Amino acid sequence: MKKSPYASSSLTRREFFRRMAAASAVFSVPQILPARLFGADAPSNRIRVGHIGCGRIARSHDMPGVFKSGLAEVVAVCDVDAKRLGAGKELIERFYRDAGQVVPAIATYENFREMLARKDIDAVVISLPDHWHAEAAIAAVRAGKDVYLQKPFTLTHAESVLLRDEVAKSACVLQVGSQQRSWGPNEQFRKACEFVRSGRVGRIKQVEIGLPTDPTKPDDAAMPVPANLNYDRWLGSTPDVYYTEQRVHSQTDIASRPGWLRHESCCLGMITGWGAHHYDVAHWGMDRELSGPLKIEGTGEFPANKIWNVHGAYHVELTYPGAVRMTVSDKLQNGIKFIGDDGWIFVCRDGTATASDPKASGGALHWLDASDPKLLDPQGITVKFPVSLSHHQNWLECVKTRASPLSPAPIAHHTNTACILSWIAMKVGRPLTWDAKAERFENDPEANALLTRPERQGYGALRMRS
């Protein structure tokens, strides 16, 4: 696992910050240090965590992941919907009771900046709609907090650059929720990438990614804003438009898929929503985690509705260095397929992995499907990645050791960029050439204009440029 240049894996978080404070004049890195880290009562083995966002993904994934790690004490929750805020607090308290532990005092906040101002909170988990990712994460980094950020990294490319650079200037440990890198129990994504990177399918020629689509429906009429929801703050940097539950989230079923995932002001659709996972694994296997495509072209269907208006059916082709071609389409099986000179490997979330017949591929592969006892036979594997069965635990371990987590900001930025470029290609419907160094399209002002978007006054990450 790659280490931070500022600390060895033997350092505690407290010792790390002590050294950083002493070196701040040399590195010119502004430090905001939690006072509790220096006191006699500093809990060296417990990281104090606050959760920002108490909706579906927080309750089903982030809150359980942090609690089950055994490395953290959850002390605060935040949400602009008072119903969800109260339910989030109750869920955390239930975790402690069910585990037979003393329930700590859990503070509640509507404004995450009030939570970030607390010196006794070490780290935060951000489980917000996509349009809030950049602003909340930058604020957390600037407050000296370590961050677990739900995918995608940001909503726009301009925000992605800003957040990546902000993390680089800090001592923050930021992990993005690309949890397929920590997928268990079969660990098929990690093992498949080890196989591909070890040359078991020969030279990679093509990668295929299958993703689903979201449905659309006619726009619902305006509704009264619920008294428990700060709707202005929920909108954040997006346009000031009328409230309807269809645009936001259910007021009766927290576990349901929220409407904002289908609304383009808040989310770009499955191309970034689930694409953030599959593109990440594709880059991992291709050894392109810190680079990206050279050319992109695609088509997509966009409904005329104004609320559930993310893309429908689509087909995108990305060309990477070495003439590797990546095809992304809703017509392909959901998962990632690596195709090389000597065969192919396909992985998906259902716990299985499949490969081409070793007889047809010159014997390069020694496994066929999940029932094969030689599934992912380690023989001949020369590239090995860190083993992680919990993405949240990996993050918290890195908070303690100051090592780099599995999904750090630079890798997440390049994954996010490829997803966003795919969406832009779908929007303009013509071939595009990407200058990876300048991070701009060549000779295409219309496409470059889509790398960012206007922000509503008083909100947005771009106004935070320093």
Image: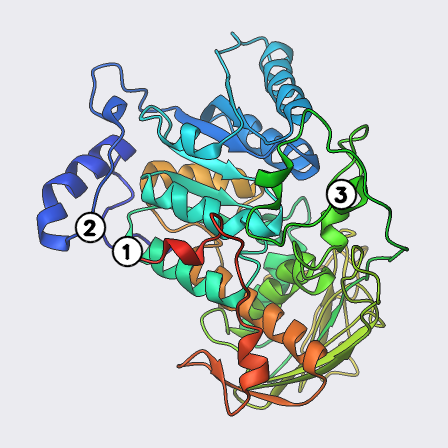
Q: Residues within 10 Å of mark 1 (few under 14, many from 20)?
A: some
Q: Quadrant of the N terminus?
A: bottom left
Residue at the extreme right of the image, as rendered? 218
Q: Are marks 2 and 1 in contact (CB under 8 Å)?
A: yes
The answer to which of 375 and 218 lies nearer the viewer is: 218
Does 312 appear above or below 130? below
Q: Earlier in the sequence, mark 3 or mark 2?
A: 2
Give how far apart the Cα atoms at labels 3 and 2 are.
39 Å
The part of the image, by quadrant, that contains residue 224 is top right
Query: Picture coordinates of residue 101 (x, y %)?
Result: 54, 9
Question: Which residue corresponds to mark 2?
Answer: 29
What residue did someone put label 1 on?
169
**Which image quarter holds the C terminus?**
bottom left
Q: Amino acid at mark 1?
A: Lys
- Local secondary structure at mark 2: loop
Query: Which residue is at a point 59% across and 35% down the rendered structure image?
Result: 53
From the viewer's perspective, tell me whether residue 167 is left or right of residue 396.
left
Give the numbered dot on residue 258.
3
Q: Nearer the viewer, residue 194 or 103?
A: 103
Q: Earlier in the sequence, mark 3 or mark 1?
A: 1
Point 31% across, 24% down: residue: 44
Coloring scheme used: rainbow
